[in-house]
Image: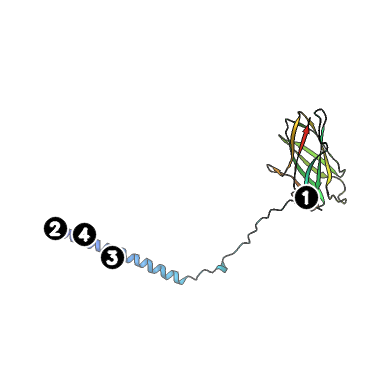
Amino acid sequence: MDNQTSNNKIFIYLLVVFFAVFVGSGLFLVMSNKKNATNEPAATTSAIPTKEVIIPTVEMSKGYINLKNDLVLNKLNSPANLTIVADSNSENITAFDTLVVFDPTAFDFVSAQSVDPNFKVYPYVKDNGLTLTVVKTGPSTVPSVFNNTQIVSLIFQPKKTGQFIFRVVPSVGKETTKFVNDQTKIIYPAVNEIKVTVN
């Protein structure tokens, strides 16, 4: 019994010593952290480098690239003639892209010709549309400022009767309808849609 009592006393003494060491080391760490914190200079906002944030702006549409129907009624066995009419908002244009969407079950694309002799048209037929890349090939000294100007003549062959919509669209995937001026600045024009009747 005496042996067990002495073991209990030793255990209690060890517990007290362990607790004292634990508390002492905790106090030591707290005090040393406070001392280091007071020795460090306070951080100032002037020492932090700042970066200027540039927020991109969306440019409003300027001018337009529109479709125009040359005939009120189109015959099934006759070609449908459409015209691209452009206004460049006083910009001197060197090239432009136009995306035309139509129903390929109702029309076949036949041809695209430049009305303006200073431009050449490169048409690319896609699933349900047509991409027109129009590039200035005439002398660069001749300004090309469009003011409700007929630029491209389009011919489609109707395949069935009815009313159909042709649209100039702002974008398809990564392609866009746009002007490029003589300073190589890209300008996004307003676009339109027209109804084509075939009987």
Q: Quadrant of the C terminus?
A: top right
- Answer with the quarter of the image where residue 68 lies: top right
- Tag 3 secondary structure: helix
Q: Nearer the viewer, residue 102 or 99?
A: 102
Is the C-beta separation of discs 4 and 2 under 8 Å?
A: no
Q: Which residue is mark 4?
A: 11
Q: Residues within 10 Å of mark 4 (few under 14, many from 20)?
A: few
Q: Is residue 56 above or below residue 193?
A: below
Q: Is residue 152 left or right of residue 101?
A: right
Tell me the distance, in whole angstroms, between the alpha carbons under discs 4 and 3.
14 Å
Q: Is residue 28 left or right of residue 165?
A: left
Is the C-beta separation of discs 2 and 1 under 8 Å?
A: no
Amino acid type at mark 4:
Phe
Tell me the distance, in whole angstroms, between the alpha carbons under discs 2 and 1.
105 Å
Is the C-beta separation of discs 3 and 1 under 8 Å?
A: no
Q: Is residue 171 above or below residue 199?
A: below
- Tag 4 secondary structure: helix
**Viewer-nearest of discs 2 and 1:** 1
Q: Which residue is mark 2?
A: 3
Tell me the distance, in whole angstroms, between the alpha carbons under discs 3 and 1.
84 Å
Q: Which residue is mark 1?
A: 63
- Residue 148's tag is none
Q: Which residue is mark 3?
A: 20
